[in-house]
Amino acid sequence: MNKKLRILIAKPGLDGHDRGAKYVARALKDAGYEVIYTGIRQSPEAIAQTAIQEDVDFVGLSLLSGAHNELFPRVVQLLREKQASDIIVFGGGVIPESDMPFLKEQGIAAIFTPGTSIAAIIEFIEANRPRVSH
């Protein structure tokens, strides 16, 4: 039997627009995942710490403010530093296509932009489901 996947949805930085993040969090919860939503204006350090404390399998970062090239990689870096690189980080929000290769090089496993279906996000999660729980 597969354990219920735990997913942290977080809003790093000063971005106060959380409608999309709340929508994704609710849809993933409705799809049967255990979801923790941290709220707005979280530091990368707080996000990484919460991810570890909550023993999550995925961290979904949402950002509209344009600071994704700094904040998303910082969360990945902190997870690596804390020996939690098994936590898969994905991002979403208003992210220019030209920034996506850099973010993927920095360890962001997938990027979902406005209009992405919840089915596509679930498909990504299921395709990357950890084989062994941590």
Image (cartoon, rainbow, N blue to C red):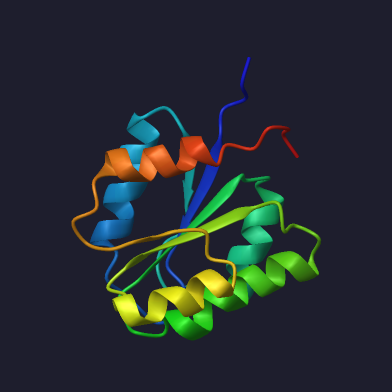
Image coordinates for residue 56, horizontal then vertical, percent? 62, 46
Left or right: 13 with respect to 93? right
Counting from the top left corner in percent of width and height, residue 6 is at 56, 39
Q: Residue at x 60, y 78 (%)?
A: 74
* Residue at left offset 78%, top offset 70%: 81
Q: Is residue 40 above or below residue 128?
A: below
Q: Is residue 82 above or below residue 23?
A: below
Report the side of 76 relative to 7 (left or right): right
Total of numbered circles in the picture?
Answer: 0
Q: Quadrant of the C terminus?
A: top right
Q: Nearer the viewer, residue 95 or 127?
A: 127
Q: Residue at x 18, y 56 (%)?
A: 115
* For residue 118, side relative to residue 36 (left or right): left
Q: Nearer the viewer, residue 7 or 36?
A: 7
Above or below: residue 19 compared with residue 86 = below
Residue 25: where, in percent of width, then height? Answer: 37, 47
Q: x, y percentage for residue 38?
A: 48, 58
Q: Residue at x 46, y 33 (%)?
A: 33
Q: Is residue 45 left or right of residue 72?
A: right
Res. 82 in view: yes
